[in-house]
Amino acid sequence: MPKYRLRCIGCGAEYSGSARLYSCPACGDLLDVVYELDDEVFKIPWLRNFESRPLGVWRYRELLPVEDLRRVVSMNEGGTRLIRCRNLERELGIKEVYVKYEGDNPTGSFKDRGMTVGVTKAVEAGAEMTICASTGNTSSSLAAYSARAGLGCAVLVPSKKIALGKLSQALIHGAKVLAVRGNFDDCLRIVRELSRDPRFYLLNSINPFRLEGQKTAAYEIYEQLGGDIPDYLMIPIGNAGNIVAYWKGFRDLKSLGMVDELPRLMGVQAEGACPIYRAFVEGANEIKPIENVETIATAIRIGNPVNWKRALRAVKETGGLVEAVSDEEILAAQRILASREGIFAEPAGASPIALLIRAARRGLIEHDSRVVCIVTGHGLKDPDIVLKSSGNLIEVDAEIDSILRALEMRDDYAADNSH
Ligand code: F0G
């Protein structure tokens, strides 16, 4: 298994990989996992040699920080579809558009990539109880993986602000679900505080091991594109961990000599919760947290994203950008993706499509571009939003006539049956 250690993203201090730390004891900044790769990894030649391993997180085990593969807590996460979207290509005039459909994961979101590694580390650490703050998907995923590992699990979610599907997942997997009268940022502040108590193992994205699992999506995209990368990667930003994970994954490919460039990382936030967008357009070096956040994309309803520093770096260093889209644009994008391509995304997962539509219309990307949009969560996570935003059901009598009338096809039917 690879040798690795933890390095502070602020002051550069290093710590043992087995230390149970969520932030740098010296300066308080976040920690990153760095590997001491031996020459074998570079010689493999990496990835192509792995034909016998299925596509998925553990295909890349040489670049994951676990001690003992036999203790891995897994449900075959990753290996999600990269779906070509030819109808969108035609409508938007963009040469290649793909969706990386993270709704294919075991609990229906990208979080499972991180949890298979994170909960494995909790088991290695001898933890009894996992804990997280969540806008929904992290709680579903942590509840499921903790159940599988036989660990207790407590999740803190903002009261009345998480989607129905996510809530029911956390409950059925047996987590203690605490609905906090406050927002996600309040929940995160509390679990960070609680995690000083060794009885709790914290699994938000400040846990450096979670992003290690999530970075594998970048490797998969490279393989699914036949050993190539997109020009642009459109990705939602909430707490900003996932964009950092992709950045890391693509940088790994570069340092392994497999690609020369990185994709431009194009982050998208909801207008009602966009502190990173604001810092980006103002050219500021720090974000200003937003107190009162609101968006129908509840997954990314976050005003004080903990991974903001690396997210801004990722965008700037790859020549990307951050945009903020309105709830109307998100709902329109969700409907367009579902009705043109048959792909059902939850609102946050549809936000990269909103960005794609905007970018195509405003000429922010070239017509001959290859774009990958990360659809981060399944549409069934949040059925309420569709029922609220769609037209009413049409109630009919149980007879042909009534149905044809409802379909406004009654006259044609009568004509067809007259001879
Ligand atoms: N998309 C979905 C569907 C999410 O659930 C999240 C985050 C994001 C995008 C943003 O990812 O935080 O890494 O920038 N959901 C977290 C949760 C916060 O608690 O489920 P990020």
Image (cartoon, rainbow, N blue to C red):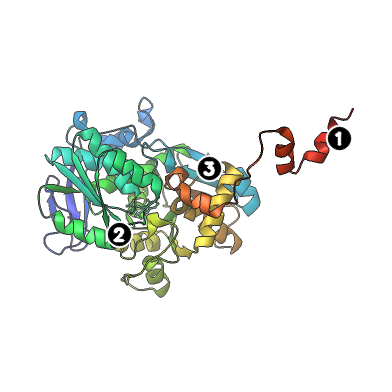
Q: Earlier in the sequence, mark 2 or mark 1?
A: 2
Residue density around tag 2, few if under 14, some if 14–19, many if 20 or more, within 10 Å: many
| Amino acid beneath label 3 | Ile
* Residue 170, quarter of the rendered image: top left
Which residue occupies 40% across, 75% down? 282
| Amino acid beneath label 1 | Ala
| Amino acid beneath label 2 | Phe
Q: CA distance from mark 2 to mark 3?
A: 28 Å
What residue is shown with label 1?
415
> Mark 1 falls on what kind of element?
helix
Q: CA distance from mark 1 to mark 3?
A: 37 Å
Q: Earlier in the sequence, mark 1 or mark 3?
A: 3
Q: Is mark 2 within 8 Å of ligand 1?
A: yes
**Residue sitting farthest toward the right:** 419
Q: Picture coordinates of residue 219 (x, y %)?
A: 38, 41
Left or right of 383? Residue 64 is left
Residues marked 2 and 3 touching at CB (< 8 Å):
no
What residue is shown with label 3?
343
> Mark 2 falls on what kind of element?
helix
